[in-house]
């Protein structure tokens, strides 16, 4: 039986994979409220790739599949900027079942980096009630992780595709095999015992944009995952 829960959703221009660490700088009032709520209730939140083509209350909407993020630690607010720095780590993947819109629509010409924009949001929040949630929430269903092992042959093939792609993208500069191996070493990807985490990291290293990684995150079987990885790493 699948596990469902209601969590805050943080749409970002990135894909978070399970077991990856993600440092975040929080500066918008809606996400400061979200982090406060998570810390007080020991809840986690969901990180999803944002979709500029879709909106929820005029805010960028999340893609339908994301990853649970748990807060590892929360640093003090920067006294100059007011920004909050937190470290998080990805856990289970999830599928959104139902979006719960925030209490506020995004104002026209809203600038989250300006004092005027922050003051505007704070005033709107005061008007609707400070207990109301400014951030998107969702009912989500946890997705079972892929448990089949990655063989060394499958891993070696992915590495070769990655090397070919990086070499092609670097032209006319030539990248030696030593330099490619050194890059893999830098990202701790030289291994003879590959796991799912290694595959995720290699794809992140070979992706051209966060959208390329969404299909990797959405893979539900090892076969589908490896096929999506090969498509991502092949020279287009």
Image (tube, helix red, strand yellow):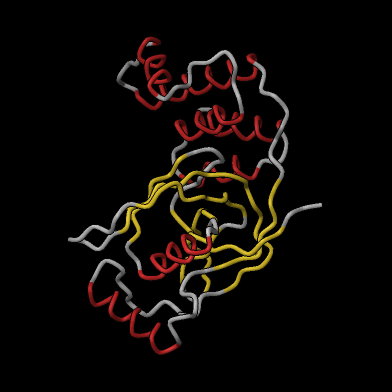
Residue 21 pos. (x, y %): 45, 40
Residue 19 pos. (x, y %): 54, 38
Q: Nearer the viewer, residue 30 or 79?
A: 79
Residue 73 pos. (x, y %): 40, 48
Looking at this rendering, what residue extends furthest in the left direction?
A: 80
**In the rendered image, which quarter is residue 183 located in?**
top left
Q: Nearer the viewer, residue 216 or 10?
A: 10
Looking at this rendering, what residue extends furthest in the right direction?
A: 1
Residue at image x 48%, y 16%? 190
Residue 86 pos. (x, y %): 37, 51
Residue at image x 63%, y 64%? 6
Image height of 187 relative to 4, above or below: above
Residue 155 relative to residue 175: left or right: right
Q: Give the total number of marks visible in the rendering.
A: 0
Residue 86 relative to residue 190: left or right: left
Residue at image x 41%, y 14%? 181
Looking at this rendering, what residue extends furthest in the bottom direction?
A: 127
Residue 4 relative to residue 196: left or right: right
Residue 148 relative to residue 93: left or right: right
Residue at image x 54%, y 56%? 44
Image height of 14 relative to 230, above or below: below
Q: Nearer the viewer, residue 211 or 96?
A: 96
């Amino acid at each position: 039986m699948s596990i469902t829960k209601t969590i805050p959703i943080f749409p970002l221009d990135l894909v978070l994979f399970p077991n990856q660490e993600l440092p975040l700088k929080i500066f918008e009032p809606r996400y400061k409220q979200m982090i406060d709520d998570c810390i007080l209730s020991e809840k986690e939140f969901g990180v999803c790739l944002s979709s500029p083509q879709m909106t929820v209350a005029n805010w960028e909407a999340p893609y339908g599949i994301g990853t649970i993020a748990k807060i590892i630690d929360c640093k003090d607010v920067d006294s100059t900027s007011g920004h909050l720095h937190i470290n998080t780590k990805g856990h289970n993947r999830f599928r959104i079942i139902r979006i719960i819109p925030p209490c506020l629509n995004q104002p026209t010409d809203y600038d989250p980096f300006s004092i005027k924009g922050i003051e505007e949001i704070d005033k709107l929040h005061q008007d609707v009630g400070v207990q109301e949630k400014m951030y998107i929430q969702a009912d989500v269903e946890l997705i079972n992780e892929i448990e089949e092992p990655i063989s060394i042959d499958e891993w070696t093939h992915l590495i070769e595709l990655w090397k070919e792609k990086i070499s092609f993208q670097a032209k006319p500069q030539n990248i030696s095999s030593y330099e490619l191996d050194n890059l893999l070493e830098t990202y701790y990807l030289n291994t003879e015992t590959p796991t799912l985490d290694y595959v995720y990291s290699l794809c992140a290293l070979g992706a051209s944009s966060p959208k390329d990684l969404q299909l990797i995150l959405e893979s539900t079987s090892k076969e589908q995952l490896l096929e999506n990885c090969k498509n991502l790493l092949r020279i287009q």
